[in-house]
Image (cartoon, helix red, strand yellow):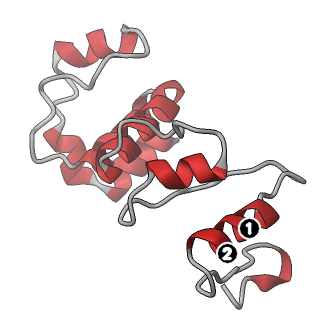
Amino acid sequence: AAFSALAAALPALMQSLSLDNAEWQHWSKAGRGADLPRVVPAAVTPFQRLLVVQALRPERLQPTCTEFVCRTLDVASLSPLSASLPGIHADSRAAQPILMITTAGAAPDQELEDLAARAMPQRYKALPMGGQSTDTA
């Protein structure tokens, strides 16, 4: 289904991949760390490469997404060097976004507000993103 959807949405991309090349067969059987075959044209964008992996080898999607995000954001890892908010703040740059994904009941709101009050008094604004607050966001 994913292959058909990609082929329908981006037929020129699919034609450019030379899927009949033997390198694709080798890639389809290779381990999780294998990069896309060398026959993939240089003009194929990193995001298009991500779509190809999703369509052809969905079990490789998570590590491919991680690699895509690291390259796009120009960071070495998505894991913070520190698990504490002050440590994350100290290790970050102003131009580097920090994405925090939490589990239910584990929101760091108060810790983040306390850190912001110390690091940049009077400048912190909270914007809720769930529930009925989507119009505000």
Q: Quadrant of the C terminus?
A: bottom right
Residues at discs 2 and 1 in contact (Cβ within 8 Å): yes
- Lateral position of residue 104 relative to residue 20, left or right: right
Q: Nearer the viewer, residue 111 or 68?
A: 111
- Amino acid type at mark 2: Ala
- Amino acid type at mark 1: Asp
Q: Is residue 124 above or below residue 38?
A: below
Residue closest to the far right: 105
Rendered location of residue 103, percent (x, y):
80, 48
Give the labeled residue for mark 2.
117
- Residue 114 got which mark? 1
Q: CA distance from mark 2 to mark 1?
A: 5 Å
Rendered location of residue 43, percent (x, y):
10, 47
Q: Is residue 136 above or below residue 53?
A: below
Rendered location of residue 119, percent (x, y):
57, 69
Q: Nearer the viewer, residue 10 or 91?
A: 91
Mark 1 Cα shell of 10 Å, populated few (<14), some (14-19), many (≥20): some
- Residue 58 got which mark? none
Residue appearing at x 53%, y 55% in the figure:
89
Q: Nearer the viewer, residue 80 or 2?
A: 80
